[in-house]
Image (spheres, rainbow, N blue to C red):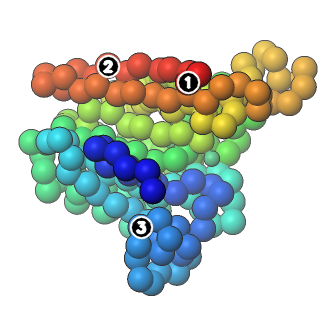
Amino acid sequence: MLSSPYPVLTCPGNHDARGPYGRVLLGRESGGDAAPVNTAHRIGGAVFALCDSTVPGEDRGFLADETLAWLDAVLAAEPAAPAFVCFHHPPVPLHAPYVDPIRQFGEERLAAVIARHPQVAALLCGHAHTAAATSFAGRPLLVAPGVVSRLVFPWREGEGEPVDYEAPPAVAFHVLHDDQRLVTHYRALP
Ligand SMILES: [Fe+2]
């Protein structure tokens, strides 16, 4: 088994099923496919709120009302700790025709929650397989690159596959300063 000094935190994506995800990856003894898989962690002085943005049986994303209520409570419980709000689907269009139709929708409800919690340093997501940076509700919204493939640029869609499966895996490395300024390094791995 691989070991690491760093904790590995995950949240489900559109190819996951909530029940098996909770049982196999999170060690939960029971759990069906109905309830969102949300988890909160306090690591290195920061709060990580991992929200389940999946919609069972669909590729698009949406945060259920119970997930937003849970997130609001998690953030309200530790207002002095910098927080990262994490989920799979980006809640804004990325101007990428292949993934925009299956992004996270209903995002104005999330924006209302974020607006109540100034300690949210950034929102982190994936799904789009493209290293991208934008903002959401006045905070950084950082999209992780793909670890197995990379989205082609929009102007190259139509030339072939919308996803490049030969691209090297890549990661995002986030560093939070004491003053809550965030620096993100994007790297392709050899
Ligand atoms: Fe995805």
- Residue plotted at (45% across, 44% down): 108
Residue with the mark numbered 1: 189
The relative height of residue 185 versus residue 112 in the rendered view (above or below) is above
Where does residue 91 sit, x and y in percent of width and height? 51, 40
Question: For residue 26, which numbered disc appears in the image?
Answer: 3
Q: Amino acid at mark 1?
A: Leu
The relative height of residue 181 versus residue 171 in the rendered view (above or below) is above
Task: Indicate left or right for 130 with 114 as reference.
Answer: right
Whether residue 100 can be seen here:
no
Q: Amino acid at mark 2?
A: Val
Occupied quadrant, residue 141: top left
Residue with the mark numbered 2: 183
Element class at badge 2: strand
Q: Among all residues in the image, which is located at the extreme front?
A: 1
Q: Mark 1, mark 3: which one is toward the viewer?
A: 1
Q: Does mark 3's beta carbon lie closer than 8 Å to ligand 1?
A: no
Instruction: Please name whichever residue, 139 or 159, is drawn nearer the observer in this view of the structure.
Output: 159
Where does residue 144 sit, x and y in percent of width and height? 51, 32
